[in-house]
Image: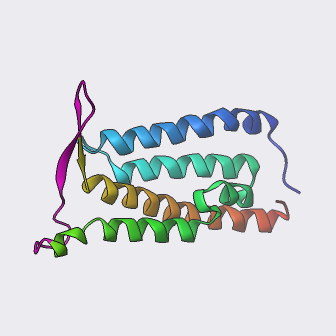
């Protein structure tokens, strides 16, 4: 049985959500600055790995959106692919993104299909690398006979 690190388990609870919030912030700010979906996904993976080290890889897998790393990565790939399909309808090249603005009364918000692509990359990186990392951590858990 693996040794419990009670301090790590307690600290991991709020830190997990703080890291995920930071990953979403990187996802959105990277839209106009360096970062975006790939780096945000890597930050999200670090939250998942933290949870796996504190609570075991199976518990971390259950905490992923959709409860499965492969499903999460597949949804990410599908979102990224769908983000460029509209260009075919307009007779443009695949992944030619559309831009617009959403009026909010006092200001307007720029919107684009690029954000859908970035979200797909984010989910794909999070699912793919989290699955890989959890698989490696799971090997160690099975060797130790714990979790």
Give the overall secondary structure of the magenta segment. loop
Snapshot colouring: rainbow
- The magenta span reads 90-109
Front residue (pair 128, 141): 128
* Badge count: 0
The residue positioned 22% from the left and 69% from the top of the image is 86
Q: Quadrant of the N terminus?
A: bottom right
Q: Is residue 76 left or right of residue 11?
A: left
Q: Is residue 72 left or right of residue 76?
A: right
Quarter location, residue 142: bottom right
Front residue (pair 38, 138): 38
Percent coordinates x, y for residue 97 in the rendering: 18, 60
What is the residue that sits farthest to the front in this orientation?
105
Q: Is residue 86 magenta?
A: no
Q: Is residue 92 magenta?
A: yes
What is the residue that sits farthest to the right in this orientation?
1
Image height check: is 128 above or below 60?
Answer: below
The residue positioned 32% from the left and 48% from the top of the image is 36
Percent coordinates x, y for residue 109 in the rendering: 25, 37
Percent coordinates x, y for residue 147 in the rendering: 82, 59
The residue positioned 32% from the left and 69% from the top of the image is 82
The residue positioned 38% from the left and 55% from the top of the image is 119
Quarter location, residue 68: bottom right
Front residue (pair 89, 113): 89
What is the residue that sits farthest to the top in this orientation?
106
């Amino acid at each position: 049985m693996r040794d419990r690190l009670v301090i790590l388990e307690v600290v991991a609870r709020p830190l997990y959500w703080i890291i995920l919030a930071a990953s979403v912030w990187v996802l959105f700010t990277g839209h106009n600055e360096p970062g975006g979906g790939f780096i945000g996904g890597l930050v999200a993976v670090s939250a998942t790995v933290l949870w796996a080290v504190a609570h075991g890889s199976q518990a971390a897998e259950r905490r992923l959106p959709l409860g499965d790393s492969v499903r999460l990565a597949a949804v990410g790939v599908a979102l990224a692919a769908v983000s460029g399909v509209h260009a075919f309808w307009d007779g443009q090249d695949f992944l030619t993104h559309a831009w617009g603005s959403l009026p909010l009364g006092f200001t307007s918000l720029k919107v684009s299909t690029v954000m859908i692509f970035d979200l797909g990359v984010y989910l794909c990186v999070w699912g793919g690398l989290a699955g890989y990392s959890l698989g490696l951590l799971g090997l160690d858990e099975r060797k130790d006979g714990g979790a």
